[in-house]
Image (tube, helix red, strand yellow):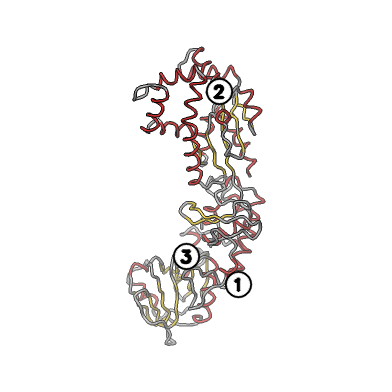
Amino acid sequence: MPELPEVETIRRNLNTVLEGEVIRDVLVYYRPIVSNDASFETKLKGQRIHKVEREAKYLKFILDDYLLVSHLRMEGKYFMDAPLNKHIHVVFNLSSGHTLSYEDTRKFGRFELVDIKYKDTYLKDIKGLAKDPDTLDLNTFYSSFKQRSKTIKEILLDQSIIGGIGNIYANEILYLSKIHPAKKGFLISKDEAKTLLTNSNLVLNKAIEMGGTTIDTFESLGHKGEFQQELNIHGKTGEICKACGTKIIKFQLKGRGTYICPKCQPSYVVAITGGIATGKSTATTYLRKKGFVVIDSDEIVGRLYQDSDVLNLIAKTFKMEAPIDKAKLANIVFHDEKQRKKLEHIVHPLVFDEISKQKQLNNEHILFLDIPLLFESNYKEFDESILIDTTEALQLDRLMKRNKYTQEEALVRIKAQIPLSKKRKLATHIIKNNGSIDALYEKIDKLLERYV
């Protein structure tokens, strides 16, 4: 898809051959490509092309009475004096005898014809286009996303926030800025926003200088771009990062092919744990609401208990009949540590395997793991751990109220886990959950600031 540098290259090339030309007539071979009715051809007849301007990824033909807006979308191209073929959908016959042909193999491009008085406002007011990076001030850019949970790559591609950037250049800009593409907008610092704007202009200006990027089909009046020779990361899957020597990887982010250097654009796996009834689930629910991905080990265990092979193995190990009486099994493992270890020996490896699979599918800037038995299970595949902590008295009271347990039943379950006093020594970070839910949320938000 032509992005800002390609559209700017096309604009410059069109101006060299079209300035001052008069449109003698127009032939439309595929009607849906023009948004106006049959008056499209009538209105254009006799109109002089004064110049071609650009706004973000749109071309603006400035005529006597009209603004002709051209959006190239995926495959739109212009040719002078080209022979007619099945992919040419609009032909402008010029008074000089030359022709300007619009070719579009996918037929996604569109033309719009509006009154010339709207030439400076139409795309901004109707289409909601933002300014290009070189005219966009830092405060406007930063304030437009500092409260958003969208990823920074989505933000760079959002034409209502910053104009002209497409997938290729977003990958390059984020690489130079050393920012993971999946980082949430609200975690981007103002300094990072400044770096992003600086690198946006650096990358786009260099690409314009080299006539755009030709990876598949881009060309401007028969000329191909050369910026593909300067690409650092886009399309470089498996190649070595020039800065650090790490192998470049590719993944899909919101349907877009995304390339990163895992070392230059770091990400984090953060394990969240706690004791029973300390508020861990409340914390992870809040993180999900903020847009983060949380891999929940309890959900994985729940699915395992629907697997007939797993159930049969558990039944055989504990000499129980299928279907398993879960209440009876819980009573056994909570009152006998050796029996609990037997169950964990079956379940934990299966949970770890499933976590690994899900981690492969989720290329996040911060990926959270909800693992109640993090330290009990000796799981090690994470960068940092967060303990949702509380007092022993509050833990007991919450568990009794939540599950309708007697004090004895609640204590049995609490004592089946490593004491909170020991977990405090093992965790990277501790969040005390001794107050209200809102107070817990505030502490989580504060902790997230470390990843800004």
> Which of the 4 quarters of the picture holds residue 134?
bottom right
> Which of the 4 quarters of the picture holds residue 161?
bottom right
Q: How crowded is mark 1: few (under 14 residues within 10 Å), some or many (20 or more)?
A: some
Task: Kindly identify which numbered label has been placed on residue 1.
Answer: 3
Residue flagged by tag 2: what amino acid is it? Gln
Give residue 232's position: percent from left, percent from top. Answer: 60, 62
- The C terminus, quarter of image: top right
Q: Nearer the viewer, mark 2 or mark 3?
A: 2
Tag 2 secondary structure? loop
Of callouts 1 and 3, which one flags the residue occurring earlier in the amino acid sequence? 3
- 284 vs 208, nearest the viewer: 284
Residue flagged by tag 1: what amino acid is it? Glu
Q: How many labels does the image show?
A: 3
Which residue is tagged 1? 209
Cβ–Cβ under 8 Å for marks 1 and 2: no
Give residue 337's position: percent from left, percent from top. Answer: 52, 20
- 240 vs 322, nearest the viewer: 322
> Which of the 4 quarters of the picture holds residue 203?
bottom right
Q: Nearer the viewer, mark 1 or mark 2?
A: 2
Give residue 428's position: percent from left, percent from top. Answer: 64, 34
Task: Kindly identify which numbered label has been placed on residue 417.
Answer: 2
